Image (cartoon, rainbow, N blue to C red):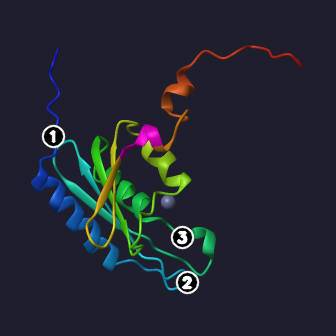
Amino acid sequence: MEKKIVHVPSSTDLEELFREAHLAKHRAYCPYSKFRVGAALLTSTGKIYSGCNVENAAYPLTTCAERTAVVKAVSEGEMSFTTIAITSDVEIGYSGPCGACRQILAEFDLDLDVYLINPKNEMKMYKLRELLPIAFTPRDLQKPRAAHDIID
Ligand SMILES: [Zn+2]
C-alpha cells in the first residue's frame, strides 16, 4: 500500500498561514457590513490558499473568506487540508466561521485544525469536529437507508 505523504505544519508554516490570513483580510470587499475577514488554508502538500469575504449588493450572494479559500484550493486541484487560519478585526476574543463555512470545510476533513486569530495574532485552535458536532458529511450519503418508514 502506498503511504500518503502528509505535510505536518511547523510553527513557521503557521506563522506564514497567519500572515496570509491577515493579508487576505486586507483585500476583503465588504462595503455593506464593513466586517473584514481573511482566511488561509494549508493543504497537506504544504500549499496555502487564502481568501477574503466578498460582499454583493444582493446580500445573500456574499461569499465568506473561508469559502473563498476552499473554492480557490479545490479549483486548483487541492482537496486535502490540514489547517485553516481565520481572522477578522474583532479585538476581544475571536470570530468563528459561520455555520455554512463549517459545513463547507466538513466536506473535506473533520479533523481540520481551525485557528481563530485576532489582530494581535493571539489565537485559539479547535478541531473542526468540535465546531460542527454530528456533522453531515459525504459518509452519511453512503449509509444504508430504510426502504420504508413508519408513515409509508
Ligand atoms: Zn462563512
Question: Which residue in the protein does label 3 denote?
Answer: 62
Q: Residues within 10 Å of mark 3 (few under 14, many from 20)?
A: some
The residue closer to the viewer here, 131 or 28, is 131
Q: Amino acid at mark 1?
A: Val
Q: Tell me where the magenta segment starts and ends, as one range.
A: 126-130
Mark before the other along the chain sequence, 1 or 3: 1
Q: Amino acid at mark 2?
A: Tyr
Q: Residues within 10 Å of mark 2 (few under 14, many from 20)?
A: few
The residue closer to the viewer here, 94 or 38, is 94
Screen quadrant of the C terminus:
top right
Residue 57, compared with residue 125, is above or below; it is: below
**Quarter of the rendering containing residue 26:** bottom left
Screen quadrant of the N terminus:
top left
Mark before the other along the chain sequence, 2 or 1: 1
Q: Which disc number belongs to residue 93?
A: none
* Residue 110 place in picture, x, y as percent: 40, 36
Question: Can residue 107 be seen here?
Answer: no
Find out whether residue 128 is within the magenta segment. Answer: yes
Question: Which residue in the protein does label 1 denote?
Answer: 8
Question: Which residue in the protein does label 2 denote?
Answer: 32
* Residue 8 place in picture, x, y as percent: 15, 40
In this rendering, would 93 be left or right of 150?
Answer: left
* Residue 32 place in picture, x, y as percent: 55, 83
Q: Main secondary structure of the magenta part?
A: helix
- The residue lying at 21 percent from left, 41 percent from top is 44
Residue 27, compared with residue 14, is above or below; it is: below
Q: Amino acid at mark 3?
A: Thr
Mark 3 to mark 2 CA distance (whole Å): 10 Å
